[in-house]
Amino acid sequence: MDRLRLIETFIRVVDSGSFSAVAREARTTQSAISKQVQALEAGLGAKLLVRSTRSHSLTEAGQLFYERGRQMLDTFEEARLEVHRAEHEICGVLRVAAPVAFGRLHIVPRLADFYARYPRIKVNLQLDDNFVDLVAAGIDVAFRVGELKDSRLVARRIGTAHRATLASPAYLARHGEPQHPDDLLAHNCLVYTGLASFNEWGFLDGQNQTHSVCVGGNFESNSSEAIRQAACEGLGISYSTLWIYGEDIRSGRVKPILTRFRAHPLPLNVVFQPARRPSLKVKSFVDYFAQAFGQDPDIAQMLAAQD
């Protein structure tokens, strides 16, 4: 028989002072309740109650087990209520992971409106350009730009991150502007190492023909922010997601080049821990940001292709 049920029965017998009262509550017989207490005693290897014709009293072991059992049941009930609230109320701590630039540009600026809708959620945002182990880090949901490497994760595709080749006017004035992807071989390319094919830059021409170039240069980094800053400083040519350079393009610090060729896009996903059904707070967070991204002009292009 379920141990928790046996403990609950024992606690109720002590609290009510009567086997018959507990039997009436459970709609069973007094004998059945007595057998449950006996089964608990047998499992513990200790006598918990001294019974007489009209009453019963706790043994020393019974008193100890009653106190600990009461604490355990109270803790269990608190945990049950917390789980119920987490599953049925939009509240609690939400641990989110995202790439550094994506979090800075597209998550943090939207949190004020998110909190206005969901004031009982607390967001713990972990920013890292490396893919974080969701299980080891205790992450509830993560934004991933690029092909997913871990097939165990549960993923929801929410868009496509379009990329472009960019350089500063100062760099182009010194070295000239490439007109074909093959021209990149003669240029200093800023290589972001956070992707599997970090030095292989792919393009599609007007006839959807693929052009791939293995580039190189004197600066590599696993930080998209560092690559962006290097491009703005005129150190070389960047092959990056457009949303990182939104303000830089508008201000003229960098300009898209090779515009006759489309850089290969990257999928944008949110991922969850394996074998875990997203809670109401996770679903609310993901739904909010998916909708917000679709309405934002800086990201609308990123979400235009839902392929």
Image (cartoon, helix red, strand yellow):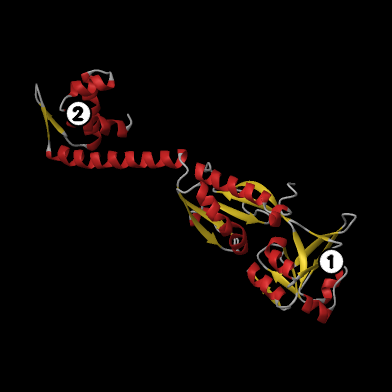
Left or right of 138 in this view: 210:
right
Which residue occupies 42% across, 38% down?
84
Q: CA distance from mark 1 to mark 2?
A: 81 Å
Residue 83 or residue 130, whichever sits in front? 83
Q: Residue 271 placed where, x, y %?
A: 59, 50
| Amino acid at dot 2 | Val
Q: Residue 115 placed where, x, y %?
A: 50, 51
Residue at the right extreme, as displayed: 207
Left or right of 157 in this view: 35:
left
Which residue occupies 56% across, 59% down?
108
Left or right of 8 in this view: 58:
left
| Above or below: residue 273 compared with residue 45 | below
- Based on the displayed image, in which of its 4 quarters is residue 83 positioned? top left
Which residue occupies 70% across, 76% down?
219
Q: Residue 56 placed where, x, y %?
A: 11, 28
Marking on residue 125: none
| Amino acid at dot 1 | Leu
Which residue occupies 78% across, 64% down?
201
Q: Residue 188 placed where, x, y %?
A: 77, 77
Marking on residue 258: 1
Marking on residue 13: 2
Disc 2 crowd rating (10 Å Cα; few below 14, some 14-19, many 20+) is many
- For the N terminus, the quadrant is top left
Q: Is residue 274 something that shows in the picture?
A: no
- Based on the displayed image, in which of its 4 quarters is residue 191 positioned? bottom right
Disc 1 crowd rating (10 Å Cα; few below 14, some 14-19, many 20+) is some
Residue 170 or residue 80, whichever sits in front? 170
